[in-house]
């Protein structure tokens, strides 16, 4: 499979370039603190504790597409799992509780920090928004995003890594760092009803969010960024190549998913018959 393009020239505008420059300027202080702030050393020790702890195991990364409404997440009770962004909005509908939680979008971390802080499981969050959280919480691990022109797959998360266009790519890197042999994706619909310039920050005007599993995922009045599906595919291809090069695999069990990068597998086929017929 040929590697997807990083971007389309037609999507490049002066405003997008200036925004990218501004992001990198604002990142300078965070990059400096990552190296020299007293808490940074303790935080790196927290990261190191997760290296290889799930070697040889499988995990599920649960993204936030509308297909989750057609996915029985209760089957994941005894699995190692990652929940992303606002997955907790599903907690009233399911017994599913992720083993780990990950969020790196700065707008999500700023606007929903109280909800995220209340989650009980270990959390992987963006270093650049550590001021929104209690850094003394031992269950929070901060990872440093790396501002680069050419995305890459980071195998040692003590070092800055590329979040890319989607938190799913970040979660895949975390899973690799933990040693998981097999990563299975669900809820990765890879399709949005909204159209516009990728990465552009907007204030939501729609009353319902049709692109995620919950209608109030990004409610009216909340700031969000339009998705960059092209960059996502570029990053996913990098992830697939890294896993395969090291004898590991990534499978896509999303119901009716549109991502063209990973091998597709039927979700229910991943579980023993006993699990499918036994209440969880």
Image (cartoon, rainbow, N blue to C red):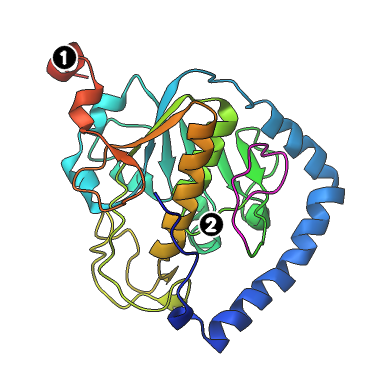
Taking the spot 40% from the left edge, 70% from the top edge, the residue there is 226
* First-in-chain label (1 vs 2): 2
Q: Nearer the viewer, residue 113 or 38?
A: 38
Q: In this view, does 237 lie to the left or right of 242?
A: left
The single residue placed furthest to the bottom in the displayed view is: 14
Whether residue 14 appears in this view of the structure is: yes
Q: How crowded is mark 1: few (under 14 residues within 10 Å), some or many (20 or more)?
A: few
Q: In this view, does 88 lie above or below 265?
A: below
Per the model, the C-alpha gap separating discs 1 and 2 is 37 Å
Taking the spot 42% from the left edge, 31% from the top edge, the residue there is 249
- SS under mark 2: loop
Q: Is residue 30 magenta?
A: no
For the magenta stretch, what is the residue range?
150-161
Q: Is the magenta stretch mostly helix, strand or loop?
A: loop
Picture coordinates of residue 225 (x, y %)? 44, 69
- SS under mark 1: helix
Q: Which of 128 and 161 is in front in this view?
A: 161
Residue 164, numbered label: 2
Residue 273, numbered label: 1
Taking the spot 31% from the left edge, 52% from the top edge, the residue there is 259
Whether residue 122 appears in this view of the structure is: no
Picture coordinates of residue 177 (x, y %)? 59, 32
């Amino acid at each position: 499979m040929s590697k997807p393009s990083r971007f389309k020239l037609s999507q490049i505008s002066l405003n997008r370039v200036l925004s990218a420059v501004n992001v990198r300027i604002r990142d300078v202080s965070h990059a400096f603190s990552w190296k020299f702030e007293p808490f940074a050393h303790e935080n790196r020790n927290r990261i190191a504790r997760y290296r290889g702890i799930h070697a040889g195991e499988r995990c599920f990364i649960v993204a936030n597409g509308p297909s989750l409404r057609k996915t029985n997440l209760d089957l994941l009770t005894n699995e190692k799992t990652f929940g992303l962004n606002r997955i907790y909005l599903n907690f009233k509908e399911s017994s599913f509780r992720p083993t780990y939680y990950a969020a790196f979008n700065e707008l999500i971390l700023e606007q929903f920090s109280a909800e995220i802080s209340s989650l009980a499981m270990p959390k992987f969050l963006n270093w650049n928004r550590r001021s929104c959280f209690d850094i003394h919480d031992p269950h929070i691990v901060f990872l440093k995003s790396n501002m680069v022109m050419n995305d890459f797959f980071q195998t040692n998360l003590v070092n800055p890594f590329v979040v890319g266009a989607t938190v799913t790519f970040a979660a895949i890197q975390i899973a690799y760092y933990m040693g998981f042999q097999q990563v299975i994706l669900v809820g990765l619909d890879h399709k949005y009803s909204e159209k516009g310039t990728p990465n552009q920050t907007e204030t939501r005007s729609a009353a319902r969010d049709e692109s995620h599993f919950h209608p109030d995922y990004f409610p009216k009045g909340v700031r969000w960024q339009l998705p960059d599906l092209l960059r996502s595919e570029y990053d996913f291809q990098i992830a697939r190549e890294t896993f395969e090069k090291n004898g590991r695999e990534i499978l896509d069990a999303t119901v009716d998913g549109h991502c063209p990068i990973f091998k597709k597998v039927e979700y229910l086929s991943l579980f023993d018959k006993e699990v499918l017929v036994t209440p969880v």
